[in-house]
Image (cartoon, rainbow, N blue to C red):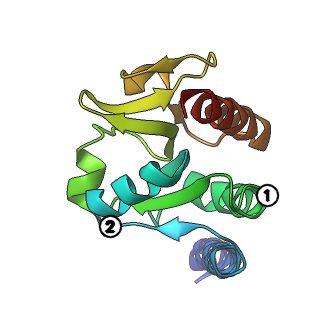
């Protein structure tokens, strides 16, 4: 009996933590301007309007859960200047797979869509068609995302 007490306490603790994360994430999504997409058509429409910051994640991913409040904050700060998008890799697996993800969260900024495909804002501030040079894998700071978006907004202004 005593051998069961510790595992039961651990399981209950984990359940409380996971339940807390889920509630916070739902609230973060509800009180933000994050757009959840499931199709390339939705994404292409947003890209035609301006830069798009995308996070590809899943509900079961702890790092994705930790990223949600950051994305929610950014979505409100950049509302009207850029779109902040969440792509659930479980609900929109075909679209997620089109970006060749291998780890989540996987985040990046698309600045435009041309005849060669998507053009991404690279982590170095330069545009690229190679998403590998434009992605952040894992939990990423707000500063990195805002820097990417600021560069993307400037790029779009100069391209228009």
Alpha-carbon span between mark 1 and mark 2? 24 Å
The residue at 51%/38% (across/down) is 108
Q: Nearer the viewer, residue 17 or 6?
A: 17
The quadrant in which residue 145 appears is: top right
**Mark linked to residue 38:** 2
Q: Residues within 10 Å of mark 1 (few under 14, many from 20)?
A: some
The residue at 62%/52% (across/down) is 82
Pinpoint residue 114: horizontal percent, then vertical percent. Answer: 31, 33
Q: Nearer the viewer, mark 1 or mark 2?
A: 1
**Mark linked to residue 77:** 1
Q: Nearer the viewer, residue 86 or 128?
A: 128
The residue at 69%/72% (across/down) is 32
The quadrant in which residue 155 appears is: top right
Q: Nearer the viewer, residue 34 or 6?
A: 34
- Count of numbered labels shown in the rendering: 2
Helix, strand or loop at label 2? It is loop
Asked if the residue under mark 2 is in contact with the one under mark 1, i.e. CB atoms within 8 Å, the reply is no
Q: Is residue 19 left or right of residue 41?
A: right
Question: Which quarter of the figure is the C terminus placed in?
Answer: top right
Pinpoint residue 27: horizontal percent, then vertical percent. Answer: 69, 81
Q: Looking at the image, can residue 66 be seen?
A: yes
The quadrant in which residue 129 appears is: top left
Q: Nearer the viewer, residue 106 or 146?
A: 146
The residue at 28%/60% (across/down) is 41
- Compared with 160, 133 (above or below) is above
Q: Is residue 137 left or right of residue 155?
A: left
Pinpoint residue 119: horizontal percent, then vertical percent. Answer: 41, 30
Pinpoint residue 47: horizontal percent, then vertical percent. Answer: 44, 49
Q: Is residue 131 left or right of residue 153?
A: left
């Amino acid at each position: 009996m005593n051998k069961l007490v510790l595992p039961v306490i651990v399981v209950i603790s984990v359940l409380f933590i996971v339940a807390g994360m889920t509630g916070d994430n739902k609230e973060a999504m509800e009180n933000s301007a994050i757009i959840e997409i499931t199709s390339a058509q939705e994404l292409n429409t947003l890209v035609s309007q301006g830069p798009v910051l995308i996070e590809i994640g899943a509900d079961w991913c702890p790092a994705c859960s930790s990223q949600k409040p950051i994305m929610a904050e950014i979505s409100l700060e950049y509302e009207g200047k850029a779109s902040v998008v969440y792509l659930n890799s479980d609900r929109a697996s075909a679209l997620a797979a089109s970006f060749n993800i291998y780890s989540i969260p996987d985040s990046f900024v698309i600045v435009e869509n041309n005849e060669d495909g998507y053009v991404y804002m690279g982590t170095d501030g330069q545009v690229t068609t190679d998403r590998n040079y434009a992605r952040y894998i894992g939990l990423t700071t707000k500063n990195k995302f805002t820097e990417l978006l600021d560069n993307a907004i400037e790029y779009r202004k100069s391209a228009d």
